[in-house]
Image (tube, rainbow, N blue to C red):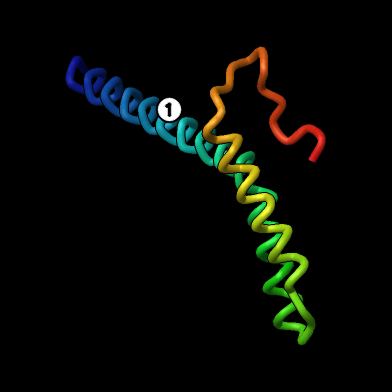
Amino acid sequence: MTHTRSVSRQAGQGMTEYVIIVALIAIAAIAVYQFFGNTVRDQTAAIAQELAGGSGATAQANAQTAATSAESDANTKRNLSNYTGNAGR
């Protein structure tokens, strides 16, 4: 009976570690999307316009502007008192 409890605890510990790792990956993905979400949307819009036979130049320019802004935001130290996320974008 003691062996069964030990295996059960180990399985529970493994599952807990897995959940923590998945949560950290999700938080990291959300942070990356906050920085680069506008860039990805504009690049996707440019590709869609080009595939439809139109010009994606405006969307490409918007993507470049968003990428430059994201780079600037990434280089700025952020804390809870000065973080605004995507407010005003």
Residue 40 spot, x, y in % from top left: 64, 56
Q: Residues within 10 Å of mark 1 (few under 14, many from 20)?
A: few
Q: Nearer the viewer, residue 1 or 6?
A: 6
Against 42, residue 85 (above or below) is above
Residue at the image point whose x is 23% and y is 25% from the top: 7
Report the side of 27 relative to 19 (left or right): right
Toward which corner of the image does residue 71 lie, by quadrant? top right
- The residue furthest right is 88
- The residue furthest left is 3
Report the side of 54 relative to 41 (left or right): right
Q: Nearer the viewer, residue 23 or 81?
A: 81
The quadrant the C terminus occupies is top right
Residue at the image point whose x is 79% and y is 82% from the top: 54
Report the side of 19 relative to 65 (left or right): left
Q: Nearer the viewer, residue 73 or 37?
A: 73
Report the side of 82 relative to 20 (left or right): right
Toward which corner of the image does residue 48 lie, by quadrant? bottom right
Residue at the image point whose x is 54% and y is 35% from the top: 74
Residue 67 spot, x, y in % from top left: 61, 50
Tell me the amino acid under the disc marked 1.
Answer: Ile
Residue 15 spot, x, y in % from top left: 37, 30
The quadrant the N terminus occupies is top left
Residue at the image point whose x is 71% and y is 82% from the top: 51
Toward which corner of the image does residue 30 lie, by quadrant? top right
Q: Which residue is mark 1?
A: 20
Number of residue marks: 1
Residue 75 spot, x, y in % from top left: 52, 33
Local secondary structure at mark 1: helix
